[in-house]
Image (cartoon, rainbow, N blue to C red):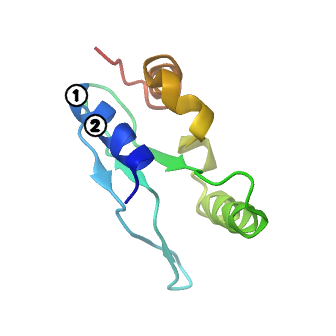
Amino acid sequence: RSLSEGKIDDWLYVNGIVHAYEKTIIMQDGKKLIPDWYIPPNAMPNSHKVYIEFWGRPKDPKYMKDKEKKLENYKKLGIIDQIISLEPKHLSDLDSYLGRFLSRVANLQVR
């Protein structure tokens, strides 16, 4: 949907990481939660599932309020510890930032 999201998606693809963009999660109350990316368990041997969120407008107060609501929904689902949050400042070094967090959160070793 944006150049920034395209950069992240390309990085996942180039690094051979199986992923889905905007895979819907249905919550118990029937509401939909749509993470930016979902990486399934065993995307690589022994890896765990993980969700990636790109928070592209950190200076927009309404957007940041929506971010907090979304993070609260992740907490309700018990998957907040499986979230990797990216911001525009991380785009210049995805190898370092995203690679390190994929290793720590998902036990996923990037090439």
Give x and y (percent) for residue 17: 26, 33
SS at badge 2: helix
Residue nearest the viewer, comparing 25 with 110? 110
Give x and y (percent) for residue 6: 34, 46
Residue nearest the viewer, comparing 92 with 69? 92
Q: Amino acid at mark 2?
A: Asp
Q: Residue 84 falls in which quadrant of the image? A: top right
Q: Residues within 10 Å of mark 2 (few under 14, many from 20)?
A: few
Question: Does residue 16 appear anywhere in the picture?
Answer: no
- Mark 2, residue position: 10
Most extreme residue toward the front, as rendered? Answer: 3
Q: Amino acid at mark 1?
A: Val
Above or below: residue 47 compared with residue 86:
above
User: What's the residue at 38%, 69% (across, down)?
Assistant: 24
SS at badge 1: helix
Most extreme residue toward the bottom, as rendered? Answer: 30
Q: Quadrant of the N terminus?
A: bottom left
Above or below: residue 11 compared with residue 80:
above
Question: Does residue 44 appear anywhere in the picture?
Answer: yes
Give x and y (percent) for residue 35: 46, 59
- Mark 1, residue position: 14
Q: Residue 95 falls in which quadrant of the image? A: top left
Q: Is residue 82 left or right of residue 18?
A: right
Does the CB distance between marks 2 and 1 fall below 8 Å? Answer: yes
User: What's the residue at 61%, 42% (across, down)?
Assistant: 81
Q: Is residue 19 left or right of residue 65?
A: left
Q: Quadrant of the C terminus?
A: top left
How far apart in space, not on screen, are marks 2 and 1 (Cα)? 6 Å
Q: Residue 47 falls in which quadrant of the image? A: top left
User: What's the residue at 44%, 21% (across, down)?
Assistant: 99
